[in-house]
Amino acid sequence: MTDAPATDELTPPVRTLMGPGPSDVHPRVLRAMGTPLVGHLDPAFLDVMDEVQELLRYAFRTDNQWTLPISGTGSAAMEAAFANLVEPGDTVLVPTNGYFGHRMASMAKRAGGTVVSVDAPWGEPLDPRDVEDAFETHQPEVFGFVHAETSTGVRQPAVPELTGIAKAHDAFVIADTVTSLGGVELRVDEWDIDVAYSGAQKCLSCPPGASPITLSDRAMDRVLARETPVRSWYLDLSLLEGYWGDNRSYHHTAPVTNVYALREALRLVAEEGIERRWERHRRVARTLVSGLAELGLERYAAEEYWLPSLNTVRVPNGVDDTALIEQLLSEYGIEIAAGLGDLAGEVFRIGCMGHSARPANVHHLLAALEETLETHRS
Ligand SMILES: *Cc1c(COP(=O)(O)O)cnc(C)c1O
């Protein structure tokens, strides 16, 4: 029999989280997680649910009634979007310009969709002309795109142009806003996005576990009018409606503590003001990007589609990215990440999200990078 590990070995160190998520959790959110549990149908909890839904509408910039947190991480909200919107036989258009577009393809396929793609190289956004061409060729029912591609540090500009094309072809738009919600300008209603999903541990600076999603009435009508039931029972929005809609009846036990955390994180967003929060991300990330340039690190994504919440820079010649990342973690307690997929070994990914988007974090990271780069370059 193995011995029980000593208790202190179970305590992870305090880190500065500047990777692609999770980001640093605000102390108020950590305290909210110590709130005593109540039942998931307790009247007091129903009030918490109402408040979370209202605050989510504020953060998403939407009046959508169907706005709720999905139990699970961002991928669960992503799967809820595709599993509910896609019926077997539907054609689904997805992007190829990053890691998460490929995940969309896998999920759409599992939902029974026929997947077609609109191509752009990794590191570039989609060109509306290519989206238009793909619509002409394939006539998809559903079009997914990634607003903030965490694998490349690219922000998709011209979102209203993309949704306009989809609307002209009577299609539904699903937007991955995991790395933009609460950090980068996002206007669900004004930009005419049918379904947007997100995660808790990126720009909302909340522990992972309850992930926002919002659907327009038009999208929810489509879900309620499906000919075949959603293949996932757990993520079936027509059933989740029973709990998060007016009835408030049992479907599954809500992750009560995660919902407390999400409420506190969203209260912080509302207190700061969503537009000021976008502005803070831009300002702090600008300091980061300038500092990285001074260290001789070349930016990967172009300025026009810069994503303040996730900054990519090229790994300099002769530098071992894995070794440098390990040293930052072990000697300075700072987490940044390596490239993913096509960009493995090519870039560093540096997050600047939510409570991590603070000048103190940026200066700490830049000073640590200056010292570590020196040892790794020689
Ligand atoms: C992190 C992320 C996801 C997946 O979220 P998980 O919480 O890891 O399941 C999806 N899309 C994008 C763009 C992400 O950055």
Image (cartoon, rainbow, N blue to C red):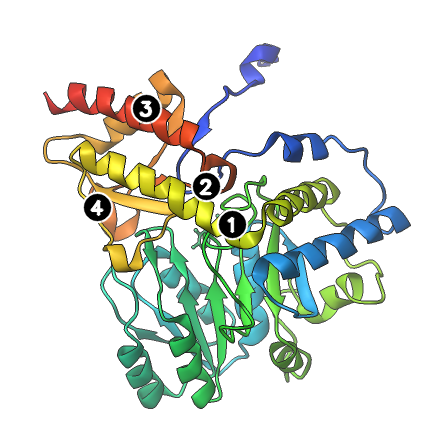
* Disc 4 target residue: 299
Q: Identify the secondary structure beneath mark 3.
A: helix
Mark 2 Cβ inside 8 Å of ligand 1? yes
Disc 1: CA contacts within 10 A as few (<14), some (14-19) or many (>=20): some
Q: Is residue 281 left or right of residue 323?
A: right
Q: Identify the secondary structure beneath mark 4.
A: loop
Q: CA distance from mark 2 to mark 3?
A: 16 Å
Q: Earlier in the sequence, mark 2 or mark 4?
A: 2
Disc 4: CA contacts within 10 A as few (<14), some (14-19) or many (>=20): many
- Quadrant where the image shows the N terminus: top right
Q: Identify the secondary structure beneath mark 1.
A: helix
Q: CA distance from mark 2 to mark 4?
A: 20 Å
* Disc 2 target residue: 21
Q: CA distance from mark 1 to mark 3?
A: 31 Å
Q: Amino acid under label 2?
A: Gly
* Disc 3 target residue: 328
Q: Position of residue 124 (x, y in %)?
A: 25, 62
Q: Amino acid under label 1?
A: Arg
Q: Position of residue 198 (x, y in %)?
A: 53, 56
Q: Residue at x 48, y 37 (%)?
A: 23
Number of the front mark, 4 or 1: 1
Q: Position of residue 206 (x, y in %)?
A: 58, 41
* Disc 1 target residue: 276
Residue 143's quadrant in the figure?
Answer: bottom left
